[in-house]
Amino acid sequence: MTSMWTLESFTAAVEGKLIVSCQAPTGHPLRDTATIVHLALAAQLGGATAIRCGGYGGLADISAVVDAVTVPVIGLTKEGRSGVVITPTVASAVAVAEAGATIVAIDATGRDRPDGSMIADSIDAVHQAGAFVMADIATLIDGESAIQAGADILSTTLSGYTDDSPVGPEPDVSLIGALRHAFPDAVITAEGRYHRPGQAAAAIQAGATAVIVGTAITDAVWITRQFVHDVTEAASRV
C-alpha cells in the first residue's frame, strides 16, 4: 500500500510539533479499538500532527485509526513481553504497512530478532510495501546501524529499555543531542518517558525534529495515579 505521504511531507508536517501515541495494553480499561480511535481523534483535535498506534491492539487499531484521522499514522505491533517486542519480524513489519501506516516503527536495537532477520530485512520489506521506517533505538550505536541499514527516521523510544542504555525516570535528552550531532540532516523523534511539557520542549531544543508523547496524554490510569500520589503526599503533611 502506497501512502499519500512522502517522507518530505511527513517531516514538514511534524517538524517542531507533537506526535501522540495512542496505545493501551491488554487488560487496560482503554484496551478497545474504538476507544483508541477516539483518543486519536482527540489528540488530532488538540494539535497532534501524527498518531503512533498499534501495540497490543495490533493491526485492527492501525487500520481503524488510519481510516479516522487525517494526519499520518506511525504503526507498530507488540509481540511478546521481553526482548525484541516492537514489530519484531519482517512479516509483522509488512503487515503494519499493509494496514495503512505511513510509517512502520520497528525495534532497531542490536538484540536478536525472533525470526532471525536483520534490521535491514524489515526496512527493505517495508520500503517495498510503500511505507517508511521509524527505527526505535536505544543508543547512538543503534542509530548509526539503523541509518546504515536504510531507516528513514530515528526515534529514541527504547533508551532505558536495553542493557546498554541509561535507566531512569527522566527522558534521554542527551541521546537526542548526540544523534543530531552525528546526523545533522536526519529525521529524529524524541520518545520515551516524556511526561511533562518542559521535557518535550527540551527535546526540541536538543535537536529533535518532533516529540512523541503517549502515557502522559492518553493513559488515564497513569495520569490519575500522579494526582493521587501528590494529593496523598500533601494530605499527609497537613
Image (cartoon, helix red, strand yellow):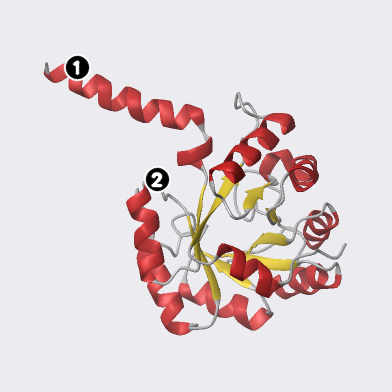
Label 1 crowd (10 A; few <14 / some 14-19 / many >=20): few
Identify residue for label 1: 235
Which one is nearer the viewer's eye here, 19 or 152?
A: 19
Q: Give the residue drawn at x 73%, y 68%.
A: 132
Residue 39 drawn above or below residue 67: above
Q: Position of residue 115 (x, y in %)?
A: 77, 61
| Amino acid on which disc 1 is placed | Ala
Which one is nearer the viewer's eye here, 167 or 51?
A: 51
Q: Position of residue 200 (x, y in %)?
A: 40, 55
The N terminus is located in which quarter? Answer: bottom right
Q: In this rendering, would 201 be left or right of 122? A: left
Q: Position of residue 199 (x, y in %)?
A: 35, 54
Q: Give the residue drawn at x 76%, y 68%.
A: 122
Q: Is residue 171 visible?
A: no
Q: Is residue 238 visible?
A: yes
The C terminus is located in which quarter? Answer: top left
- In the rendered structure, which disc, 2 or 1, sits on the residue that comes first in sequence? 2
| Amino acid on which disc 2 is placed | His
